[in-house]
Image: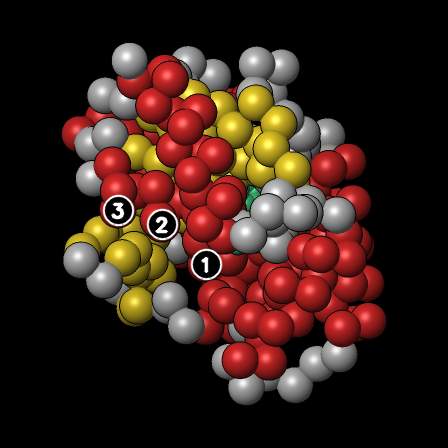
Amino acid sequence: MFKIALDGPSGSGKSVMARAVAERLDFLYVDTGALYRAIGLYMFRNGIDINDAEAVSSNLSNIKLELSHSEEGQVVLLNGENVNKDIRLPEISMYASKVSAIPSVRDFLLNIQRETAKKNNVIMDGRDIGTVIFPDAQVKIFLFAKDEVRAMRRYKELVAKGIETTYEEVLSDMQKRDENDRTRAIAPAVPAEDAIMLDSSDLNIEETISTIIGIIDKKLK
Ligand code: DC
């Protein structure tokens, strides 16, 4: 099976790109951040201290996570409940980032990610796809953009969803989360040595998609 690893920080445009590329190539798009978000949501709802790694670890046995994919995209089921909406709440972002630094959480999510690529050609977006989940991915891209550009994109997305916030708040939350993801001891959000670095700061969506398709086309040939 063909595996495309699309890693990078939040707001770099990974999900938009991965969705578009998956559609054009008829690959399955897997959003791995949604899995960490679902674990974060569980801890949030149950009042578990996410700074207490032991408490988080011991609660993992109460969690059953399932991923399904249809025409409408990916659905995450947390103990049977579709949590696609709730995992996008801004307060869940930091929960996801915090739990993602706990080794038992990463182990817990390893199989579900690897299994999806056994039966499908996939484009998977995340932070450690090219370094940990699929070091053997045929294509590895690390998508990034200037902080200010990423924060403005995220701010506009949130406002469009009717979520009240300010640009400054979005920028500061994003920088805190990036720092957390980049500096954690396990599977830090850094590019794989053999990843192609793509800066989307000055590219629009269409230009970024065609650059990515160009990179993949070269590998597919
Ligand atoms: O991509 P996202 O913003 O939905 O991800 C939420 C958090 O999950 C992010 O702050 C870091 C973590 N994450 C991770 O550690 N590894 C992944 N493969 C995907 C996400």
Identified by mark 2, the residue type is Arg
Q: CA distance from mark 3 to mark 2?
A: 6 Å
Tag shown at residue 23: 3
- Secondary structure of residue under mark 2: helix
State left or right for residue 20 relative to residue 103: left
Q: Measuring 54% from the left and 36% from the top, which residue is drawn there?
A: 7
- Is residue 37 at least partly visible in the picture? yes
Q: Is residue 85 above or below residue 61?
A: below
Q: Is residue 32 above or below residue 188?
A: below
In the image, residue 12 lies at what x, y percent? Answer: 60, 48
In the image, residue 174 lies at what x, y percent? Answer: 73, 58
Q: CA distance from mark 1 to mark 3?
A: 25 Å
In the picture of the structure, the residue carrying the numbered disc 1 is 38
Quadrant, the C terminus: top left
Q: CA distance from mark 1 to mark 2?
A: 20 Å
Q: Measuring 38% from the left and 66% from the top, which residue is drawn there?
A: 84
- Determine crowd level at label 3: few under 14, some 14-19, many 20+ residues with C-alpha closer than 10 A: few
In the image, residue 44 lies at what x, y percent? Answer: 57, 68
Say which of 151 and 178 sits in front.
151
In the image, residue 198 lies at what x, y percent? Answer: 60, 33
